[in-house]
């Protein structure tokens, strides 16, 4: 299970839309993956509303590179995924042979410890890995929120950003 850690808001950030986007990008979002059924549920909080995005992960065609770096004491390899509009870089370690990662990304021969999204200029980096035996009741599929498709959720976000820009970065009040 991946969860966001709240980031302090920079009071010197001048662009209201960027500040608001940063605030909502760091909400209490969760990604749940059922490894037995290969289903996922993302719980996304946006503008005071909670959404559930359900589905099967898309197959990502990663291109492996020879680049390596260390993250949290683990030797990581770099993999790149490019689609028509974006480039995703993932740093994964084969020392933890679990094919998972944050958001919808996974399918590599190890856990993703860092993920960068060039289009959104976003970098997600693991800061803690905990190995322990867990009770299955500790990991629950998120169930709070309105169920939407990925496309519906993306449209809701884009429409709100467009509305905020048209209203000078404010809330439209």
Image: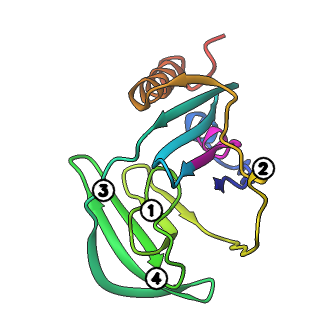
Number of the label disc, if any, that sits on residue 66: none
Residue picked out by circle 2:
137
Instruction: Give percent across and percent down for residue 145.
Output: 65, 25
Mark 2 to mark 1 CA distance (whole Å): 31 Å
Q: Earlier in the sequence, mark 1 or mark 3?
A: 3
Name the one closer to the observer, 170 or 68: 68
Q: Secondary structure at mark 1?
A: strand
Mark 4 to mark 3 CA distance (whole Å): 18 Å
Residue picked out by circle 3:
60
- Find the magenta span and give its range: 21-32
Q: Secondary structure at mark 2?
A: helix
Instruction: Give percent across and percent down for residue 47.
Output: 65, 26
Mark 4 to mark 1 CA distance (whole Å): 19 Å
Q: Comparing marks 2 and 1, which lies closer to the viewer?
A: 2
Q: Is residue 30 magenta?
A: yes
Q: Is residue 148 above or below residue 5?
A: above
Q: Secondary structure at mark 4?
A: loop
Q: Earlier in the sequence, mark 4 or mark 1?
A: 4
Q: Comparing marks 4 and 1, which lies closer to the viewer?
A: 4
Give the image's coloring scheme. rainbow
Which residue shows up at 60% across the image and 43% down it?
Answer: 25
Number of the label disc, if any, that sits on residue 116: 1
Residue picked out by circle 4:
94
Q: Earlier in the sequence, mark 4 or mark 2?
A: 4
Based on the displayed image, in which of its 4 quarters is residue 164 positioned? top right
């Amino acid at each position: 299970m991946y969860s966001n850690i709240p980031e302090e808001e920079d009071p010197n950030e001048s662009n209201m839309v960027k500040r608001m986007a940063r605030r909502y990008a760091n909400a209490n979002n969760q990604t749940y993956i059922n490894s037995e059924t290969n289903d996922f549920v993302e719980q996304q909080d946006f503008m005071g509303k909670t959404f559930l995005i359900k589905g099967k992960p898309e197959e990502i065609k990663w291109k492996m590179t020879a680049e390596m770096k260390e993250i949290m004491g683990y030797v990581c390899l770099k993999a790149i995924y490019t689609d028509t509009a974006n480039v995703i870089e993932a740093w994964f370690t084969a020392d933890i042979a679990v094919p998972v990662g944050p958001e919808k990304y996974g399918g590599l021969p190890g856990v993703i410890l860092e993920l960068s999204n060039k289009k959104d200029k976003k970098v997600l980096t693991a800061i803690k890995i905990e190995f322990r035996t867990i009770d299955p009741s500790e990991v629950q599929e998120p169930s709070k929120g309105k169920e939407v498709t990925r496309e519906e959720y993306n449209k809701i976000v884009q429409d709100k950003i467009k509305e905020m820009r048209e209203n000078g970065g404010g809330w439209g009040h």
